[in-house]
Image (cartoon, rainbow, N blue to C red):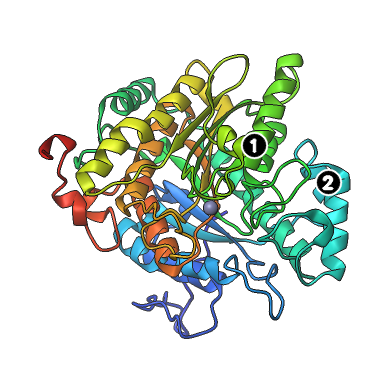
Amino acid sequence: MAMPAPALAASGAVAAPARRFDWSRPFCPTRLAEWVAGRTGPAEADAPVRCTVVVQSAWNAHAPGPGVYAVEIPDRIRRALLCMPRVARDAGASVGLRPSSRAISLDQLPSYLAGVHQPEYIQRLLAEAAVSAESPGSLASGDLYLSPGTPTGVGAALGTLLDAVDLAAARGRSPVPLAARDAARQHLLARSADVSPAPGPEGPAELAATFALVRPPGHHCTHAAPMGFCFFNNAVAAARHAFTRHGIEHIAIIDFDLHHGNGTQDLVVDINQKRALDPEAPPRLFFGSLHDIKSYPCELYDAAAIFSASICLMDHDHALWNVHLQPWADFGEFLGHYDGQYRALLTQAAHFLAGCPPDRSLIIVSAGFDAHELEYPSIQRQGRRLPAEFYYLFCRDLALLARAHTDGKMVFALEGGYSQGALANGLYSALAGLAGLGPDHATMAGPGRMARPSRPSDNP
Ligand SMILES: [Zn+2]
């Protein structure tokens, strides 16, 4: 589906889009999408789109009631989208934006979430939402609230996510040429977090990424328990849809966030266990996570949570790789961590995907921006601040991974990220990496530290 065309003026000529998006009016994702389409020109079908941001139309349905304090609020979507005018200017038509009006109804939720969440859990949650305006008392754990709009909100989030999967699957039907695949593989294995432009042959058919800007997040939610703002597990629901609707059997779920995606990992272990017993049954999954081991759900010294968030196991039909964020004193030290532990996550994902047919493989990214250096101090209680450039570098390398192994198919789902600074700056850097922009666009502020990185070896 093409983006809406720019509005026609009274004379019949195409009206030039306003230079600046009018943020003073009540925020509407559809209006912003129309403005972006007008700024970036050709319709999606004709343009070299590398990534489309898909945003839910019912973005404000799930909201805390009066007197309920929460940082997971509807305004997160607007805060993230604040970067889109800059993205439109810098990336042009290579990044699109479109609202999704697809909503999964209450009746449909159990079938779309079959195998991910127990039907009884779904029914209980929806029943609680109808009568509760605060924490779901019978469903455990803090950091959760329900509202009468919650069923609409989670249905819209799931519908948006499925739209993002369908769009990536449709765009990724063109095989990436073997030579381009090999070049991407070589670059991924060999290169370090340097400042050179994105290497290798690039083309519109070689990246088919979508970024589902959805809330509430999902990666803490297990089979039958909501946790940490999360009610349904978005990443695993997307994997299920990719398998049942598109026959995609090999899926690498990569999670970057301040917090460990414990719910996703639990579900991946279960699904791979079932696959070990019945190879015909569910998809085969990899889960790799980059997170802070001292933050939730590990901050209360729960030994099981800490061990779970530290497992690296690529055998016995399991494929798990957990990496802990490291403190850094200067940018050179950060680059050392990036070249070492952080990129190892992508290397393990590449091992998992190697040998799988690209047309039946997919990367799903649980993308959180709460480890960003501009996140609220109340979220960054452990001071584990990632430089803005991380999101550019990691997404640039994820694009190589997709080009090498999945015919470019990759679906992002928003996880954490709460302050305006973290969301807008994090999303900008991620999209700049996916769009193949050079390091001058690593952050909204420009090249910054990428212009003069000190290598670890430079430091005495
Ligand atoms: Zn988080």
Quadrant of the rendered image containing residue 375: bottom left
Q: Is residue 332 visible?
A: yes
User: Is the residue marked by circle 2 packed among few (<14), some (14-19), or many (20+) residues within 10 Å?
Assistant: some
The number of discs equals 2
Instruction: Give SS at disc 1.
Output: helix
Whether 46 is drawn above or below 252: the answer is below
Whether 334 is drawn above or below 180: the answer is below
Instruction: Give SS at disc 2.
Output: helix
Q: Which residue is mark 1?
A: 239
| Residue 307 % position (x, y) | 57, 32
Look at 43% across and 31% down and name the residue there: 345
Q: Nearer the viewer, residue 262 or 275?
A: 262
Look at 57% across and 44% down and name the residue there: 301
Q: Is residue 82 visible?
A: no
**Is residue 349 shown left or right of residue 306?**
left
Whether 23 is drawn above or below 329: the answer is below
User: Is the residue marked by circle 1 packed among few (<14), some (14-19), or many (20+) residues within 10 Å?
Assistant: many
Label 1 sits on what residue type? Ala
* Label drawn at residue 110: 2
| Residue 448 % position (x, y) | 20, 57
